Amino acid sequence: MRIIGMIHLETLPGFHGFKDMDYVVERALQDAEALEQGGVDAILIENTEDHPHTERVREVTVRAFVRVAREVRGRVKLPIGICVLWNDYRSALRIAKECGASFIRVPVFVDRFRTEAGIITGDPEDVILFRKRIGAHTVRVMADIHVKHAIILTKRSIEESARDALRRGADALIVTGRVTGDAPILDDLKRVRQACPEAEIVVGSGTTPQNIKELAGYANAAIVGTYFKTHNKIDPKKVRRIMSLAREVEQGGLG
């Protein structure tokens, strides 16, 4: 099972609480190095502390994100991904192209949700067309299905949403729990796997040493953030523990 480690950025310019860019970069590099030392397969960078989250971010935030992502890309030898909250896939694609990232995460790719940033409607056609327009063809789109921290307003099952996301160009599907740190309901994960047997499925939250082997029975990868933290910093020991279990799962033929 592949593990994608999270870097939760400190507050960026354009949001209340921003300190200075040197501090943001330093913290991001510390986390990146700890994740690489722990053995993760890739890193996902997200502007978690930019409150209140908005559907789109300002250009000053984009430029700051580019700077941090470039610094991380230059420091570690791992593939990196970009997620711009709440659902700013255009900015994520621009950042990914500028810094050489391999993938983006799109929280709302299909369906319609009520979120802390308002009602957001997925627009998969625009995601794919914008990626083509800016020449970011190699950047993969990882799409959340029935995303956390949101109430779905579309009346359809998780299987229907998953199949629709693949039809409309998603390269991978992310299944999460209800909030950060919550594992997916196992039945949801099973249903998505049964509906999309050939898809790349990623657990988007809640992976721990206690459940990783069970989750790996239905998912190819997991994004891990909360578990890796001790006193708000990445703990390499925790990273190594998860990676050891992930490799055991691979040797056993799962994930």
Image (cartoon, rainbow, N blue to C red):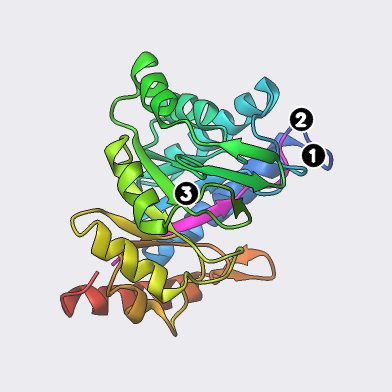
Q: CA distance from mark 3 to mark 1?
A: 21 Å
Q: Which residue is mark 2?
A: 14
Identify residue for label 1. 18
**Between marks 1 and 2 in the image, the one whose residue lies nearer the viewer:** 2
Does residue 2 lie above or below 127 as drawn?
Answer: below
Q: Nearer the viewer, residue 46 or 150?
A: 150
Tell me where residue 151 sits by quadrant. bottom right
Which disc, if any, is residue 44?
3
Residue drawn at (42%, 66%) of the image: 38
Q: Amino acid at mark 1?
A: Phe
Residue drawn at x 21%, y 74% as measured from the top left = 254
- Residue 52 belongs to magenta span: no
Residue 66, position as x, y percentages in the image:
55, 29
Question: The magenta stretch spans which residues?
Answer: 1-12
Q: x%, y% of residue 63?
A: 61, 24
Mark 3 Cα-neighbour bin, 10 Å: few <14, some 14–19, many ≥20: many
